[in-house]
Image (cartoon, rainbow, N blue to C red):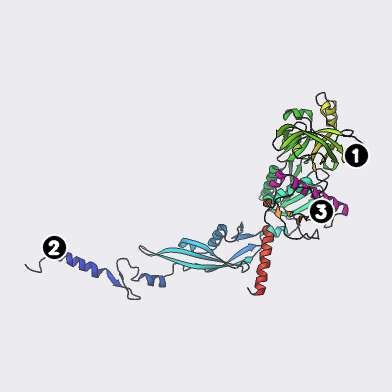
């Protein structure tokens, strides 16, 4: 047989030889053998990585602007975004600041740790791009941002007078500020004051100033969710353009809180008392929320009056916390009737001022008999022999249904006479920084009254678990500050010594939160000491 004949085996061997020799070429850069059918520009993979940069055109440095007053970052051209360090929001903001990043595919992006005081933000970004048909190249590179400080427009306005656009005037027509102390803690816990540009304390309330109308409306919505208020609004024309018809206004909102506070003695209109569950008209206010909650201590019946119902026919309380009288429990017997944490009991009490003077005693029913024992002190209202200038109370006395049910004494809460005054506590509450409109310290009498009201509020927090659950209590680790105007955090330490006879309630450490500001300051102090020692 002729060896040059076109046999099938010869044809197969020739095609195999062509596949082995025709598809293999040498790299034009280093001479390494590569597959010519899939090579990009006759370059091997190592030469492609060393000669082609898919991240070319993406800057390796940048600047991030931070407002130190509100801790927000600038998103050009004029937006400001809140983001914490090494958060997803800050990572997204950093990637948006890089040019030409949209031309490649982002595979991964993460932060690289830097010193907190270095004012640098480092990112490691991994991108991928196609360099030829079917050839993908993936590369990683670092980007360093320099943190520069720039004040946002809102903070600039806060340091300039008369730049507010909307104001909320919060008022309550009472002689004390117990409700404002509670409201202040709720505002701080929910950060409802973060958009304010200024806060001023007035004689009968607080004024909040905002740069935008919608911020004031959001604050009004928060107030309605925590306290019963009545809101009136008005606007004042600042300027007008006759050519375009555009006008600029300043908006004012007057928010008045219901003038009924916790532990107040209230005489309800009899028609209203029947409409809310046929409750006794003579009640005490045991809680303030979105509505006013009333309690009949004789039957433990409760009812609530919403803000809308109250403002249709407003009424004032008969007596407030300043008119409470101290009584001593001579004897107490439970009736067995329970409602939640309350236990209805019948007690014989005598005024603390009458002990050793006369033998006058009073019969009273109380709803907190589960915590009372003979010899305990309680606070209550002495109705027998009292002169109340109220038409509602007179209508109750003249009524056939309720005239005979008016008690001589209404007990409100337990009293701890052995509690030390100005005692040190292991917890504290934060306070809002408010401007004094007259730039002058209040009189000594006003200071003493404010301190007494704040001390009474702190005692209410210690005694009421439900009230503590609604507030943010922080651990107090620093000593008492002697200057009351040096800081805006009210220090209330409690270091109980051995043999102390304080019988007041205590707050468990598990209920307290760590103050992050103090932890940050302490960490800075430790870092500074370590730097001095050369560690």
Give the residue drawn at x 13%, y 62%.
8
Q: Of the numbered discs in the image, which one, if any, rests on residue 149?
A: none
Q: Residues within 10 Å of mark 2 (few under 14, many from 20)?
A: few
Q: Quadrant of the C terminus?
A: bottom right
Of the numbered discs 1 and 2, the one sitting upstream in the chain is 2
Magenta segment range? Answer: 443-471
Q: Is 32 on the left-hand or right-hand side of 71?
A: left
**Pick the front one: 328 or 40:** 328
Residue 309, percent from left and from top: 73, 34
**Residues tagged 3 and 2 counted as in contact (Cβ below 8 A):** no
Q: Say which residue label 3 marks.
A: 422
Secondary structure of the residue carrying numbered label 3: loop
Residue 393, picture quadrant: top right
Q: Residues within 10 Å of mark 1 (few under 14, many from 20)?
A: few
**Pick the front one: 318 or 337:** 337
Q: Is 251 on the left-hand or right-hand side of 61?
A: right
In the image, is residue 2 above or below residue 374?
below
Q: Is 354 on the left-hand or right-hand side of 19?
A: right
Query: Mainly helix, strand or loop, the magenta region?
Result: helix
Q: State the CA–CA distance, disc 1 to disc 3.
A: 27 Å
Q: Is residue 499 magenta?
A: no
Of the numbered discs 3 and 2, the one sitting upstream in the chain is 2
- Residue that protrudes farthest toward the top in the picture: 400
């Amino acid at each position: 047989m002729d060896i040059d004949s076109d046999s099938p085996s010869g044809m197969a061997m020739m095609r195999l030889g062509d596949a082995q020799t025709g598809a293999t070429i040498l790299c034009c850069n280093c001479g390494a053998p590569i597959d010519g059918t899939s090579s990009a520009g006759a370059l091997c993979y190592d030469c492609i990585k060393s000669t082609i940069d898919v991240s070319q055109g993406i800057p390796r440095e940048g600047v991030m602007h931070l407002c130190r007053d509100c801790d927000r970052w600038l998103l050009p051209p004029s937006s400001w975004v809140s983001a914490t360090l090494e958060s997803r929001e800050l990572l997204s903001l950093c990637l948006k600041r890089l040019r030409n990043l949209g031309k490649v595919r982002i595979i991964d992006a993460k932060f690289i740790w830097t010193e907190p005081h270095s004012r640098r933000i480092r990112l490691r970004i991994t991108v991928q791009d196609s360099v030829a048909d079917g050839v993908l190249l993936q590369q990683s590179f670092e980007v360093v941002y320099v943190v520069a400080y720039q004040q946002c427009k809102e903070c600039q306005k806060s340091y300039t007078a008369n730049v507010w656009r909307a104001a909320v005037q919060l008022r309550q027509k009472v002689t004390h500020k117990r409700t404002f102390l509670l409201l202040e803690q709720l505002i701080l816990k929910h950060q409802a004051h973060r958009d304010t540009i200024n806060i001023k304390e007035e004689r009968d309330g607080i004024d909040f100033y905002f740069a935008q109308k919608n911020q004031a409306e959001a604050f009004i919505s928060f107030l309605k969710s925590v306290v019963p208020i009545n809101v009136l609004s008005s606007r004042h024309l600042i300027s007008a353009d006759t050519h375009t018809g555009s006008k600029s206004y300043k908006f004012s909102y007057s928010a008045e809180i219901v003038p009924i506070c916790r532990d107040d003695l209230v005489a309800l209109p009899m028609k209203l008392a029947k409409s809310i569950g046929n409750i006794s008209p003579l009640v005490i206010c045991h809680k303030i929320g979105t509505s006013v909650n009333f309690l009949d201590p004789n039957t433990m019946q409760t009812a609530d009056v919403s803000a809308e119902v109250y403002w249709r026919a407003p009424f004032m309380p008969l007596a407030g916390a300043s008119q409470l009288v101290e009584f001593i429990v001579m004897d107490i017997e439970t009736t067995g009737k329970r409602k939640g944490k309350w236990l209805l009991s019948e007690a014989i009490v005598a005024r603390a001022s009458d002990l050793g003077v006369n033998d006058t005693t009073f019969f009273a029913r109380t709803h907190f008999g589960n915590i009372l024992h003979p010899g305990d002190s309680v606070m209550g209202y002495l109705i027998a022999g009292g002169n109340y200038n109220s038409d509602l109370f007179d209508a109750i006395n003249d009524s056939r249904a309720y005239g005979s049910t008016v008690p001589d004494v209404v007990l409100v809460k337990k009293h701890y006479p052995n509690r030390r005054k100005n005692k040190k506590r292991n917890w504290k509450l934060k306070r809002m920084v408010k401007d004094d409109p007259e730039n002058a310290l209040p009189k000594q009498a006003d200071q003493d009254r404010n301190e007494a009201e704040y001390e009474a509020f702190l005692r209410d927090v210690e005694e009421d678990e439900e009230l503590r659950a609604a507030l943010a209590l922080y651990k107090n680790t620093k000593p008492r500050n002697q200057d009351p105007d040096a800081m805006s955090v009210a220090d209330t330490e409690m270091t109980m010594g051995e043999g102390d006879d304080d019988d007041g309630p205590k707050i468990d450490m598990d209920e307290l939160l760590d103050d992050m500001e103090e932890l940050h300051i302490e960490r800075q102090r430790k870092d500074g000491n370590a730097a001095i020692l050369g560690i």
